[in-house]
Every structure is written in structure tokens, then in C-alpha cells.
Image: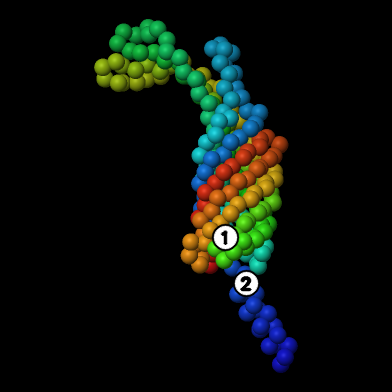
Amino acid sequence: MKKYLFLLMAATSTATIAAPYVGLEYGLTNMSHDYSTTFSNDNVSLTPDDSSSAFGGFVGYRFNEFGLEFGYKKFESDDSRSQMLVSDKPGYTKEREWDADLDATQFTFKPVYFYNINEKVQLKTGLGLTYTQYKFDSSANTEYENDLTDHEFTQDYVAGDSKSESVFGGIASVGIEYMVIPNLALGASASYQVDSIANSTSFMLSSAYYF
């Protein structure tokens, strides 16, 4: 009897201190990578390595100070050039455009550690793995626009380098959360991710609900 009572108390205790949570996040990501393309006929090179907006979400399960978390994040970077040319079509402006885009879709799995500063504020750190799908595309074209009707059309389309790759990597993160109400937290975090193709630094704002 005592044995069954002990097991029941243990199960009840575990249910009390362990809980799932979900969240959304939005912020900025800066990538550093080796993707680039050169249009030799135009003597133009593009490297999409600027900062861009990022959004994602996460689900996790917390056990006291520790937890396991799965995450998803989508971010991209681009680079472009344009040059006005002398038009060979009366009534139209002529512009040469070059574009390169790098899209990243990232999945994360990481153990996390929670540290309660007080009843409302907690630190959250994580160290884990990433699986990132990269897609790089580039192109060039000449665009004509009618000065009166704004009618547009393109010519001389040139496909540049294009590549899709998926790789595993690692990620480290640190953040802080403030409990607005007992189950809802607003927070901010910073993370650094690296793999064989690129590394990225992200600064995110988040909201999380603890069940």
C-alpha cells in the first residue's frame, strides 16, 4: 500500500513541476556565408549578406529548471544592383537589374536551462543542434517602363547561380523572459548558429505561454 501511495505522490509531483509551453518570435538575423554570383558580361558581383527580418516559433517541455525545445525559424538575405541605361525604345525608360536571394529555413533542437531571478523574471539559455535548408538564386534582366502608362516588360533575362543545400549545425542562445501574467511571458533573446555553409546571429523578441 505504501508503495502505491509513493508512486501516486511521485506522479502527482511530476505533473505539477513539468509543463509544456509554446511561443512565437520575431526579430533580425545577420548571415555570413560563401554564396555569391558574378555576371561577367556586366562586371557585377552580388553577395546577399545583409541583415533581414526573421520569424519563427517553438514548442517545449519544461522539467523544473531544465527543458527540451524544438524550434522553427525562417529568414532570408538579398543583394541587388540597378543601372539606368539609354533607352532604345521611344517613350520607355530602360533599366538593367541584378538580384541575388538567399532563403534559409531552420529547425532547432536544444536542451534549455531556466534560472528564476525572481517570481516574474527568468533567464533562459540553450545549446543544441540545427538543421538548415538553404536556397540561393540569382538573375539579371533589362526592364522597360512606359513613361505615360507605367506599362512594364522585361528582356535579356539571364539566370545566375542557383543552389540548394541542407546541413546540420549547432546553436547557442541566451534570453530573458518576464511573466506578464502567471502563464504568459514576453522576452528577448540572442543566438549564434554555425554550420558548414553559414553562420548567423539573431536578436529576437518573443512571447511564450506555459501550460
Amino acid on which disc 1 is placed: Val
Which numbered dot is residue 121? 1
The residue under the point 66% across, 84% down is 8
Rendered location of residue 156, percent (x, y): 46, 15
Residue plotted at (50% across, 23% down):
80
Instruction: Name, please, the residue furthest toward the left.
Output: 148
Residue 36 picture quarter? top right
| Residue type, numbered disc 2 | Ile
The percent coordinates of residue 78 (x first, y second) are: 53, 30
Q: Residue at x 39, y 13 (%)?
A: 94
Instruction: Name the residue rendered at 59%, 42% in the picture.
Output: 202
Position of 200 relative to 44 (above/below):
below
User: How much space separates mark 1 and mark 2, taking CA atoms?
Assistant: 18 Å
The residue tagged with tag 2: helix, strand or loop? helix
* Residue matched to label 2: 17
Q: Residue pushed farthest bottom? A: 1
* Mark 2 closeness class: few <14, some 14–19, many ≥20 residues within 10 Å: few
Which residue is at the far front? 118
Residue 211, disc: none
